[in-house]
Image (cartoon, rainbow, N blue to C red):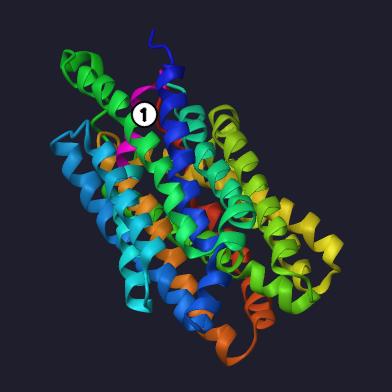
Amino acid sequence: MKTTNRSVLGAISVAHLLNDTMQSLMIAIYPLFKTEFHLNFAQIGLITLAFQFTASLLQPLVGSYTDRHPQPFSLAAGMACTFFGLLTLALATSFPMLLIAAAMVGSGSAVFHPEASRVARMASGGQHGLAQSIFQVGGNTGAAIGPLLAVAIVLPHGQRSIALFSVLALVAMFILTGVGFWYRHQNRQPKSLLAVPAVAPLNKRQVQQTLAVLLTLMFSKFFYFASISSYLIFYLMQHYAISTEQAQYHLFYFFFAVAAGTLLGGPIGDRIGRRQVIWVSILGVAPFTLLLPHVSLEWSAGLIVIIGFMLASAFPAIVVYAQELLPGRIGTVSGLFFGLAFGLAGIGAAVLGQIADHWSIETVYQICAFLPLIGLLAVWLPDLRMKTSPN
């Protein structure tokens, strides 16, 4: 019986924490860039788009290539790209340089996520939901830490202090080099020990229909997620007339709740089924998103926590569900869904930035409140537990 390699899962989760700390730091210091470079909301959205779009385009390509040609040390190489992106961000003197730096960080993420997700599944010992949650919770925890580091270090000391965080990339490169040696050893084992089911649990037409539903649910989740991650700070500052520092703490609450939801979403899916988790987490969040634009500051903090927790619980379940839908194509599936997550968030940030400039930031939240209702489509997802036996 296969056993879960918790040391490898821990290493890949810590690397994910460091990776996403650096990413969320960039988002959290948008107010600094807005002031220093005199940017409007549309330009803020373009920075997010440069980062997310690069990652979105490259991740499926990386995953598809490494399905056929495993690259154990590509994880460390991708982190090196993030390292240079941070240094460029710290030294940027113009808006185009900010876009280039954001694209470099996005390229690093494009290499990291599909390969790290593959490593998590390899180390899962058959507990795929648990492994995916452990991997993803590292990233969500890093996303929660980033805004706090922005408040403590970058906002008081300015743009150049971003260079300090390149040390995190160096630490991650060291960890991922060790993971690379383990990964290479796994690929040298007899193929019979590494075999995965080669036949999809549904026919081709059913697989296509199910993928279409999953992609639509991803649109709902990540467009709404973009409204929080890119614009929550500006919304709170304008709607409630609070300081940047106070708004940063609300962003921390959201990302902390996302981390908790991610940690629980995978194991719950292992027990009760991923379809059920997807259904409850996406559609179930709708009452709270509809309330958010109409409550006090204190109530908004509580709603943000509930929304973050429920939305996040869906993603580990969606990724593992898709991996089970297309067995033997782990890198391609992981790259597609992580890439789609980045791409939708980037497009969402750009579109919502235009809405905020032309109408108001409050309008953004009034429109986005209805997005989780798309979760009704989850009724069309088949229960794969009825189609396959557990690995």
x and y percentages locating residue 211 in the rendered image? 37, 53
Q: Which residue corresponds to the image point at 48% horizontal and 71% vertical from the top-left?
A: 348
Q: Which residue corresponds to the image point at 62% horizontal and 34% vertical from the top-left?
A: 264
Residue 344 at least partly seen: yes
x and y percentages locating residue 235 in the rendered image? 68, 74
Task: Quadrant for the N terminus, please.
Answer: top left
In which quadrant of the rendered view does residue 260 lie?
A: top right
Residue 300 lies left or right of residue 150; in this view the side is: right
Task: Quadrant for the C terminus, please.
Answer: top left
Residue 225 in the image: above or below residue 311: below
- Residue designated by label 1: 175
Residue 83 in the image: above or below residue 194: below
Q: Which residue corresponds to the image point at 56% horizontal and 51% vertical from the top-left?
A: 146
- Residue 120 lies in the magenta stretch: yes
In this figure, what is the number of numbered marks? Answer: 1
Magenta residues, start to end: 114-125
Depth check: 280 or 225 in front? 225
Residue type at the position of mark 1 = Ile
Q: Which residue corresponds to the image point at 26% horizontal and 52% vertical from the top-left?
A: 60
Residue 203 at least partly seen: no
x and y percentages locating residue 131 in the rendered image? 46, 28
Disc 1 packing (10 Å; few <14; some 14–19; many ≥20):
some
Residue 21 lies left or right of residue 276; in this view the side is: left
Depth check: 373 or 153 in front? 153
Residue 260 lies left or right of residue 185; in this view the side is: right
- Residue 345 lies in the magenta stretch: no
Residue 337 in the image: above or below residue 124: below
